[in-house]
Amino acid sequence: MGATITFEEYQKIVSEHTANIEALKVANTAEIESLKTAHSEEVKRLIEENEVLKGVVAAMAAEIEALKSNQNKNSKNSSKPPSSDGLKKAPVTKSLREKTGRHTGGQKGHKGNTLDLVDNPDIVVELNPVSHCDCGGKIIIDMDGFIVRQVTDLEKPKKITIEYHAHDGYCEQCGKVHKASFPKGADAAASYGEGVQAMVSYLNIYQMLPLKRTAELMRDLFGVEISQGTVIKANESTYVQLGGALEEIKEELINSEVVNFDETGMRVDGSLHWLHSAGTKEATLYVLHKKRGKEAMDAMGVLPFFNGTAVHDHWKSYYYYLCAHAECNGHILRHLVFLFETLKQDWARDMICLLMRIKRHVDLSKLFGGDRLDLSEIQEYELIYRQILENAAIHLRMDSPYNTTGVEIERVDENTAAADAGLVGEDVNTDSTVALKLAAGILAAANTDTKGKKRKKTESERMVTRLAEYEQETLMFMYDFNIPFDNNAAEQNCRMPKLKTKISGCFRTVEGAEVFAGIRSYVSTAIKKGKNLIEGFKAALRGQAREFIYPEQT
């Protein structure tokens, strides 16, 4: 017979078992909670690490695009000069110019320059046939009937020397002696006249001949032996007489409605200087300066007093001035071509097509006498322009480029952040700080590079932002038909001075470069006004440069 226990003993045993069970339950619950907490922390760490890695990947992708951009840029798809292409020829890109269907050469209605017969030839040569026929008969010359052909040719220019005899005279009454005065230019026993000085300045400054070749041409063509120093002195003599003319040119530019501005680098005295240009269809002004930005523009003296529209590239220093501004769409198109052809950005192609479509519309309106587009047409083009940039921003995963309050950071809901961190089912309020820190870390990682610095925008992002911020300046040619589509006029103004540096390499002195810039301003303005340059150089040497350029103001 088994052992028996009392009821009190039985209750004690049950109580002990119950306590053991409760202890095991508490231990298991604590272990489960510990595992759950550890799992939650691990999930948070992995999510945060994953988002940081996403930011690193985005930064590396931006760096790769930047490297590709630098490697694949050339003079055809960016603002880089052709000289930077090196030995590798830039690939041929499709021209943005539209085909007109016309053949090359002179077009129908074009006024040609044909050689006409002159009424009073300098030399007449009578040409007669042979004196006897094959049959032995004598040839009778018909002096009244003949065919005329003229040959226009050149003789070697003639050098002339003018000798002045300055006599003394005396008064027959008081005996005072009076001396004759030599004319201006006859300052020494032997000197060069204004014709020689004008020619050497014309050859050196306008035709871009180096000093040595200028002296050689004067010797071979005119028989005048001069030194290279004579050429330099002639240029200086011309330059010192241009003060009034250059001031008038500056005033004309200040009072113009539209002026094209540009700048180009020049090596002077072993260092980089900048030649700044301002020009219209009627005038050009060049100023040399050590700086490229606002300091140089102030020294030029046009933009600080200008109230019209300044056409220029996207050099930010121009925007210090309160005049109206217009961007060069030629530069913009080259950047867009690069983005489309090299970086495969389809939105860039759409923007190219839009800008060219607007240009075509404006050109046709001008052709048929229009002076503005309809308001509805302008609003339609603006809408398409903005839609292209909004779509580009979506494709590039960037904020709207038309956000006027700066870069807008996406707000992260606390519950969403907590759920992403593995805190579902917990008291979110107790971990809201963790959730917000995690969200901020995610956003910061996406905008930092591999070194922890703030990530630079990619070229595509910068272009989208620029086109949105400077929409009015980009489309200025659509609003005002007097505004050109591009800044080619200013680039043409810089082309000849740039050619000078290609021929001569550099300017040895700042003074020589300033002389070139001043005379070139006078020359370019004279050409635009249809003046004869040789006569212009002579007028400058006589101190009449202002009267030569602006005869109506004398």
Image: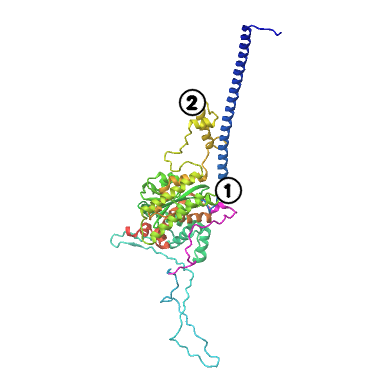
The amino acid type of the residue labelled 2 equals Asn
Whether residue 405 is situated above or below residue 429 in the rendered picture: below
Kind of element beneath mark 2:
helix
- Residue at the image position 45 percent from the left and 72 percent from the top: 114
The residue where tag 1 is placed is 71
Q: Earlier in the sequence, mark 2 or mark 1?
A: 1
Residue 472 magenta-drawn?
Answer: no
Q: Nearer the viewer, residue 121 or 214?
A: 121
**Image check: 469 left or right of 448?**
left
Residue 82 magenta-drawn?
Answer: yes
Label 2 environment density (alpha carbons within 10 Å; few <14, some 14–19, many ≥20): few
The residue where tag 2 is placed is 429
For the magenta stretch, what is the residue range? Answer: 79-108
The amino acid type of the residue labelled 1 equals Gln
From this viewpoint, is residue 191 visible? no
**Image check: 1 left or right of 370?**
right
Q: Nearer the viewer, residue 377 or 262?
A: 377
**Image check: 337 left or right of 325?**
right
Query: Which residue sits furthest front?
Result: 1
Label 1 environment density (alpha carbons within 10 Å; few <14, some 14–19, many ≥20): few
Q: Quadrant of the C terminus?
A: bottom left
In percent of width and height, residue 41 lies at 57, 27
In percent of width and height, residue 293 lies at 45, 45
Query: Which residue sits furthest left?
Result: 173
**C-alpha separation, residue under disc 2 versus residue under disc 1:** 51 Å
Q: Tell how many labels.
A: 2
Query: Which residue sits furthest right?
Result: 1
Whether residue 450 is situated above or below residue 2 in the rendered picture: below
Whether residue 533 is situated above or below residue 430 in the rendered picture: below
Magenta stretch, overall SS: loop
In percent of width and height, residue 51 lies at 56, 35
